[in-house]
Structures are given as C-alpha cells and as structure tokens.
Image (cartoon, rainbow, N blue to C red):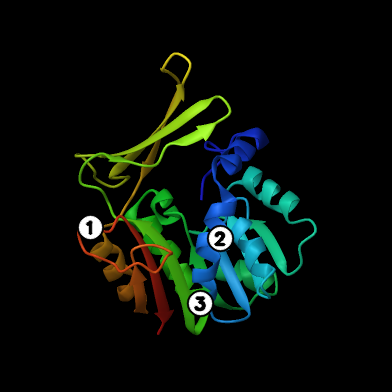
Amino acid sequence: MKNESFFPTIQSAIDYDNFINWEIRLKREIPFLLQYLRKRTILDIACGSGRHAIALSEKGFRVVGIDYSTNIIKIAKEISRNANNVAFFVIDATNQKLKEFFISKEYKTFDNAIILGNSIANMGSLEKAKKVIENIHSILENKGRFIAQTINKPKKPYFLPLRKLERGIMQRVMFPVSNNQDEHNIELHFKLIDTSNLTYLETKIDKLYMFSAKEFEDLVIKIGFKLIKKFGGFNFEPFSSGETKTVVWVFEKI
C-alpha cells in the first residue's frame, strides 16, 4: 500500500508496475495460493496493479483488491477491464470503518485475505500494521484464511536483487535504523544507476516498519488467528529461523 507521495502520477504507477517481472512472480506465487486459499471470495490488500487479483479471478474466485493509491488503482482497473469477478477500490486498509465500507458494497465477509510483497511493512508503524490485521480478522469468515508474505527484519544492510529498467539498473538496499521509535525501523533506499557511466540518476528513501518472523507471528496470533503453515518462500521451502529472509504465512481465523 503506497500513498500518492509514492505514486504522484499515473506514469509513476506504470513505472512501478513495469518494475516487476509479473510473469515469473505469478508463475511462482499463484500455485501456492491455490493450494491454501479457501474457495469463493478473496480480499487482496495493498493490491497494487491487481495482477494477483486478476489471476485469481481467472481461477474462479470472486476477488476484491484495495489500495490507498488512486493512481495504482486506476492502473488495476485498466488492466482488468476485460476480467470478470474482480473489483478494485481506493481505501486505506487501516480505515476504522473498513468492514462497514465492504458491507456498503455488498461484501459482508470474505473467505480469504492476502497481503503480499512485504506490504505490511509499508503501513509504516506498529499501530497501523496491527490495525490492518485487526481489520482482516473482522471481515473474514470463521476459519477464513489469511496469507501474508513478509521479509524478516534485517539486522544489517540487506541488498535486494538488482532490477533492470529502461534508464538503468535499480539498486535496492534495506538499512536498519538505530533510533527507531514510533514511525519506522528500516529505510529502503532506491537508487537508479546509469550503467553507461556508473552514476546515480535518482535516489529515494521509503521508511518501513518491519517485523522479525517471531514478532509478526506473535502479533497475528494475539489478534485471533492460528498458524497453519509457514514457509521460506512460495516454492514451499521450509522456514529456518535465522536463515530465512522471505516468509510466507498461512493463518486461519479462530
């Protein structure tokens, strides 16, 4: 979930969408989701351009995607214009009246909720992350599934894979912040490198609130879920405490 300071224009939303290799990502992630999702309805939180929502609607689910960014939802609606059983709305996942919003749209509850791509960290604070999970709990059916993807909070600089863009190479590095109080504990630095002369073209910093695997698990369970499975990625690799960087969680509402 990114606000308009992150996607100030439609072009910035398009650039972000083009940044991701969706063919590879969906090929890896959709089979996993199909194995653990319950049938019928899915809420895709921080859905971005809606690629997961559209792919899952094609598998027979009724899917709703939400994001705080008006511009990224415009992209999702354009991409999904010929798709069935999928809808997108601009709304903050931390909204106190999220459940009432869905009731007004004739979605009383959902069988599943997903929040992928470490999007929970983009909420920016523990309080907001907690509110999102509480909202998920309130709008799920009993025994509804909650699938989340997180990155284990790094204790030292963590370099993410380089991405090739039209104008150069995007370097992303997560830096722990030592004086974290209320707002964030990780800075994600985006640096666009001009490969012709090895200079930085652009630099941007995104402030995240990230969890260790134990912190996230404890929080979700405290809110009213039980853990079904956790993996070290979408390829069903086992979770290993202290070694696993990406964690994929399957929770169930109790």
Q: Where is residue 118 in the image (x, y as percent from the top left)?
A: 41, 54
Observer able to see residue 46: no
Residue lying at 24% horizontally and 45% vertically, measured from the top left: 181
The residue lying toward the viewer, choosing from 10 and 234, is 234
Secondary element at image label 3? helix
Q: Which amino acid does label 3 sit on?
A: Gln
Residue identifier under label 1: 243
Please rate how many residues cluster around mark 3, counting C-alpha atoms within 10 Å: few if below 14, some from 14 to 19, many from 20: few
Secondary element at image label 1? loop
Q: Nearer the viewer, mark 2 or mark 3?
A: 2
Q: In this view, does 68 lie above or below 198?
A: below
Q: What residue type is labelled 1?
A: Glu
The residue lying toward the viewer, choosing from 154 and 103, is 154
Q: What number is the disc on residue 197? A: none
Q: Which amino acid does label 2 sit on?
A: Lys
Residue lying at 64% horizontally and 39% vertically, measured from the top left: 14
Residues under labels 2 and 3: Cα distance? 14 Å
| Left-right relation of 27 to 227 | right
Earlier sequence position, callout 2 versus callout 3: 2
Q: Quadrant of the C terminus?
A: bottom left
| Left-right relation of 9 to 183 | right
Q: Position of residue 209 (x, y in %)?
A: 33, 49
Q: Where is residue 228 in the image (x, y as percent from the top left)?
A: 37, 80
Residues under labels 1 and 2: Cα distance? 24 Å
Residue identifier under label 2: 27
Observer able to see residue 184: yes
Q: What number is the disc on residue 35? A: 3
Residues under labels 1 and 3: Cα distance? 25 Å
Earlier sequence position, callout 1 versus callout 3: 3
Please rate how many residues cluster around mark 2, counting C-alpha atoms within 10 Å: few if below 14, some from 14 to 19, many from 20: few
Earlier sequence position, callout 1 versus callout 2: 2
Residue lying at 55% horizontally and 24% vertically, measured from the top left: 167
